[in-house]
Amino acid sequence: MNAINFILANWDFILLILAAVAAVVLAIFRGNKSVVMKMLYSLVTEAEKEFGSGTGALKLADVVSKIYPKLPAIIKTFISDKRLTEWIERALAAAKETWKKNAAI
């Protein structure tokens, strides 16, 4: 009963602490996401050079296997396989735009 009484007496402070922790985690997640997107851009470009066209599943598997060990722990905690695949597809779309402008890349 002491724990329940403590929570009831300090619920506003506990809620404030939880909100602060959530804000810090979100800030870290967003900052790390931009770094991850840059890494994905580079890995997608390397996979395209290595495997060529028509090997999408192979390139995706290659990028996932290379990026996952490099991901910050906070990202690994909150990211699903589906979200990682979406990020890879976004990086690929950005890379394709760059490749159109500069074929030498």
Image (spheres, rainbow, N blue to C red):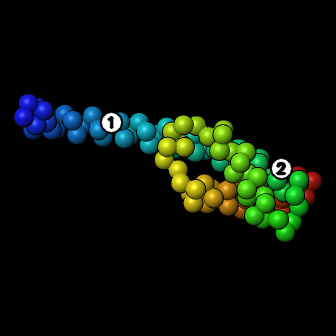
Q: Give residue 22's quadrant in the image.
A: top left
Instruction: Say how many tags the image has.
Output: 2
Q: Mark 1 points at which residue?
A: 20
To which residue does mark 2 refer? 46
Q: Looking at the picture, which amino acid does disc 1 mark? A: Ala
**For the view shown, which residue lies furthest in the front direction?**
1
Q: Are marks 1 and 2 in contact (CB under 8 Å)?
A: no
Looking at this rendering, what residue extends furthest in the right direction?
104
Residues packed near mark 1 inside 10 Å, few (<14), some (14 to 19) or many (20 plus): few
Task: Determine the residue positioned at 7% across, 34% down.
Answer: 1
Query: Which numbered marker is on residue 73?
Result: none
Using a 10 Å C-alpha cutoff, classify the residue at mark 2 as few (fewer than 14 neighbours), some (14 to 19) or many (20 or more): some
At 46% from the left and 39% from the top, the residue drawn is: 27
Residue 35 visible to an observer of this rendering = no
Q: Give the vertical position of 16 relative to 90 (above or below).
A: above
List x then y, in percent, for residue 37: 65, 48
Element carrying mark 1:
helix
